[in-house]
Amino acid sequence: MVAAVEVVFEEFDEYLALQRGRSEHTRRAYLGDLRSLFAFLGEQPSLDRLTLPVLRSWLSAQAASGAARTTLARRTSAVKTFTAWALRRGLIESDPAARLQVPRSRRSLPAVLRQDQALDAMNAATSGAQQGDPMALRDRLIVETLYATGIRVSELCGLDVDDVDTGQRVLRVLGKGDKQRTVPFGEPVLRAFSAWLTDGRPALATPTSGAALLLGARGGRIDPRQARTVVHQTMAAVDGAPDIGPHGLRHSAATHLLEGGADLRVVQELLGHSSLATTQLYTHVTVARLRAVHDQAHPRA
């Protein structure tokens, strides 16, 4: 990649992080998409060569190579965000992606746990922590918190000790776009926090741990990849449960809240969704589950 283009990418990455509040995962994906586009341009890639026909040809080539519709939608969004930014910066004279259509991705119903499976998963995590092993205490807290609060795994890993108010039983969560919200939790999570803060974290903390709430074996803040491993290992201990990760626990939390009668807008606030339409996806999950039960149980279904 031409050095000048890489400099532009670095500036765009900084814009995504500081002004758009995009996560590291999203920024990495967007930059990967842009590198794919500029590689498509050939040996002398430049912003001047970006035209609407070129962008359409690139997306067509991606589709022909088997890229999923969701991937094409993200790559289109990455390019549209980039060219709009480049136009504002004066790097290009017109926005070639302004009329580029984002392919509609099919929103599939997410895999969720049944409530009895969720209870089995929490029991498995609690059972593993009974011996007081620091890592097991941490793993129990990870699973309990993700399911009880529905927060994102990145939000969980970003928590500091001071973000936990055990008296009020709430978390102070920094979400997408650096938006802060308060999320409540119940007695099971309170017990998990108490055990972790009393017996688990002190055993793993080092002088470089800082304020990080959840620590790895060497005392550093854990990352989402480690948390995903913990969740998958816990799910493997639950007979018949789908192999879900942290996002699946988030889906399950939202679904079970709605099944319990929670107001849709309250669930939106708890999950940190900017759009109610995103939260409404879970109502479809709930209806689908009700329909499945009805079809199996009712004689005239």
Image: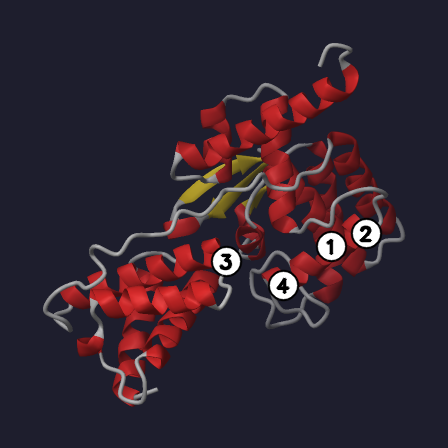
The tag earlier along the polypeptide, 4 or 2, is 4
Horizontal side of residue 263 vs 238, given as left or right: left
Nearer the viewer's eye, disc 3 or disc 2? 3
Spot the residue most to the left: 93
Mark 1–mark 2 distance (CA, rounded to whole Å): 6 Å
What amino acid is at disc 4? Arg
Q: How is the image coloured?
A: secondary structure
What element does badge 1 sit on?
A: helix
Q: CB of mark 1 within 8 Å of CB of mark 2? A: yes
Above/below status of 270 relative to 202: above
Q: CA distance from mark 4 to mark 2?
A: 17 Å
Confirm or deny contact between disc 3 and disc 4 (CB under 8 A).
no
Q: Earlier in the sequence, mark 3 or mark 2?
A: 3
Q: Which residue is mark 4?
A: 225
Label 3: which residue?
68
The location of residue 203, given as percent across then percent down, is: 76, 63
Q: Amino acid at mark 1?
A: His
Q: Residue 237: where, in percent of width, then height?
A: 85, 49
Q: Which residue is mark 1?
A: 232
Q: Are marks 3 and 2 in contact (CB under 8 Å)?
A: no
Q: Nearer the viewer, mark 3 or mark 4?
A: 3
Q: Viewed as shown, does residue 100 lie left or right of 219?
A: left
Give the amino acid at mark 2: Ala
Q: Residue at x 35, y 78 (%)?
A: 40
